[in-house]
Image (cartoon, rainbow, N blue to C red):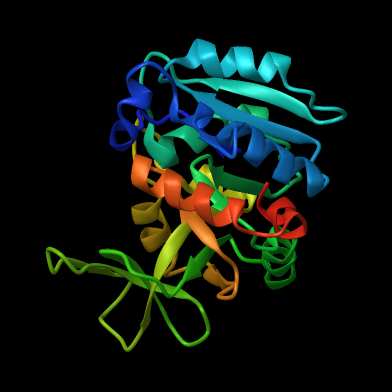
């Protein structure tokens, strides 16, 4: 599932007239980059949620050459549902026998996502989140065996713990994750809600793990400055390395 419904308020003025999914890196829309990466993984079905300028995203998908990959729309035009609500609403569109890769459309990376998927399946995690040691104000906290144990906001000092506070590594979540289909039935039956607090609720009983690929480059393109940083970096790479991002 590609999460493409957000308002992208940090990306104005572009998002005053367009969805953030169609902002470009080296003249390629973010949604195109995400779809190409997913297609190369051999995935045969992808769900894209839409809300902000939904018709523009839908039109792009209609014109996109998906080959043998089926693309389905999860329409959130009436109400933006946040990550948890978006995945829950899309549940009928997924294959109950398959795991679900969830990919934020504004992420650009050269990470080996096939290794994320393999690790998730080998460890039989309920959810596997890609995390890195990086600068941010909101961290996920993990034990030595990569089990999620808490959350911390360094700006406000707020913390949430699965149980009691313990020694933990604080890592930034990179907006790409894999979940088992059965996780959907363990989400609350309500409208809009973020998924991270639900992981904290589930982590006491289930394996909610972190996956690291610290040598990989990762870009959040959620602001004009960050979009330019990603574009400048990838433009400066040899063409063989550019293809790992695009």
**Residue 89 visible in the displayed image:** no
Position of 147 relative to 90 (above/below): below
Outermost residue toward the right in this view? 68
Residue 214's place in the image compared with 13, above or below, is below
Considering every residue shown, the one lying at the far left of the view is: 156
Above or below, comparing residue 9 to residue 206 in the picture: above
Residue 191: quadrant of the picture = top left
- Please determine whether, in this image, residue 40 is positioned above or below residue 131: above
Residue 64 shown left or right of residue 9 in the figure: right
x 32%, y 89%: residue: 167
Answer left or right for 69 relative to 139: right
Q: Position of residue 123 (x, y in %)?
A: 68, 72
- Residue 160 position, x and y percent, is 24, 67
| 116 relative to 104 in the view: left or right | right
Residue at position x 53%, y 70% in the image: 209
Image quarter for residue 115? bottom right
- In percent of width and height, residue 174 lies at 48, 58
Q: Nearer the viewer, residue 233 or 112?
A: 233
Quarter where residue 35 is shown: top right
The number of numbered badges drawn on the structure is 0
* Residue 148, position as x, y percentages in the image: 43, 71
- Image quadrant holding the N terminus, namely top right
Image position of 65 (left or right of 158): right
In this rendered view, identify the residue nearer to me: 190 or 6: 6
Residue 104 visible, this angle = yes
Q: Residue at x 49, y 48 (%)?
A: 186
């Amino acid at each position: 599932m590609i999460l493409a419904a957000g308002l992208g308020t940090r990306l104005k003025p572009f998002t005053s007239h367009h969805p953030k999914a169609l902002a470009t890196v080296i003249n390629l829309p973010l949604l195109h980059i995400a779809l190409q990466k997913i297609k190369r993984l051999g995935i045969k079905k992808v769900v894209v949620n839409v809300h902000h300028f939904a018709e523009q995203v839908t039109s792009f998908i209609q014109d996109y050459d998906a080959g043998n990959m089926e693309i389905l729309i999860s329409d959130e035009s009436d109400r933006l549902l946040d990550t948890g609500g978006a995945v829950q609403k899309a549940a009928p569109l997924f294959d109950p026998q398959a795991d679900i890769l969830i990919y934020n459309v504004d992420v650009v990376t050269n990470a080996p996502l096939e290794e994320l998927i393999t690790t998730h399946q080998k460890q039989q995690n309920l959810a596997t989140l890609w995390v890195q040691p990086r600068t941010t104000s909101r961290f996920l906290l993990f034990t030595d065996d990569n089990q999620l144990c808490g959350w911390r906001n360094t700006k406000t000092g707020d913390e949430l713990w699965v149980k009691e506070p313990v020694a933990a590594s604080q890592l930034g979540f990179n907006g790409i994750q894999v979940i088992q289909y059965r996780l959907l039935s363990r989400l609350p039956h309500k409208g809009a809600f973020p998924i991270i607090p639900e992981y904290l609720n589930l982590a006491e009983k289930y394996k909610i793990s972190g996956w690291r690929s610290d040598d990989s480059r990762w870009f959040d393109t959620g602001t004009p400055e960050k979009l330019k940083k990603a574009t400048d970096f990838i433009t400066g790479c040899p063409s063989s390395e550019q293809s790992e991002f695009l």
